[in-house]
């Protein structure tokens, strides 16, 4: 097996997202395919402030639409990855 890997251009996976106050948005632990693991970690904190598990696409949407973050679109990310800019 060679050391070369295909460039990952598809946005996928799950992330823990939390908000403390109207202006603070945080992203934590990421997993590509184990959202149940993230959910267990959040429940271990027994606090709503610990966050929620969302897919990465939804997290990006929330950051852009509700918090005004300037994030590149998926198409732009794909072009950057293919050009070796990421």
Image (cartoon, rainbow, N blue to C red):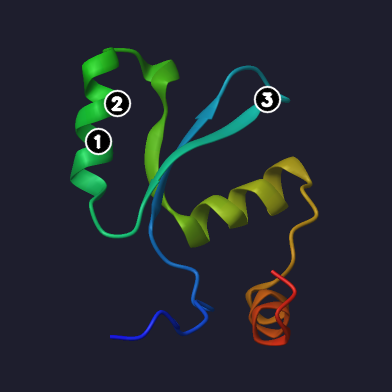
* Residue 61 falls in image quadrant: bottom right
User: Which residue is tagged 3?
Assistant: 24
Instruction: Check the image and name the residue furthest to the top.
Output: 46
Q: Give above or below for 59 relative to 39.
A: below
Question: Mark 2 falls on what kind of element?
Answer: helix
Q: Residues within 10 Å of mark 1 (few under 14, many from 20)?
A: some
Residue 73 placed where, x, y %? 70, 71
- Residue appearing at x 26%, y 13% in the figure: 46
Question: Tag count in the figure?
Answer: 3
Q: Nearer the viewer, residue 39 or 81?
A: 81
Residue 48 placed where, x, y %? 38, 18
Residue 63 placed where, x, y %? 66, 47
* CB-based contact (under 8 Å), mark 2 and mark 1: yes
User: Which residue is tagged 1?
Assistant: 39
Q: Give above or below for 62 relative to 3.
A: above
- Judge left or right: residue 29 versus residue 44: right
- Judge left or right: residue 31 versus residue 67: left
Which disc, if any, is residue 42? 2
- Residue appearing at x 20%, y 40% in the figure: 37
Measure the C-alpha gap from mark 3 to mark 2.
18 Å
Measure the C-alpha gap from mark 2 to mark 1.
5 Å
Q: Going from the N terminus, do you reach mark 3 or mark 1 first? A: 3
Q: Going from the N terminus, do you reach mark 3 or mark 2 first? A: 3
Question: Mark 1 falls on what kind of element?
Answer: helix
């Amino acid at each position: 097996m060679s050391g070369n890997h295909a460039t990952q251009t598809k946005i996928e996976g799950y992330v823990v997202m939390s908000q403390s106050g109207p202006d603070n948005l945080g992203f934590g632990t990421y997993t590509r395919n184990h959202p149940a693991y993230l959910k267990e970690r959040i429940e271990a904190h027994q606090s709503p402030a610990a966050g929620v598990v969302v897919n990465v696409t939804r997290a990006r949407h929330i950051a852009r639409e509700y918090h005004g973050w300037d994030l590149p679109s998926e198409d732009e990310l794909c072009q950057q990855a293919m050009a070796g800019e990421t």
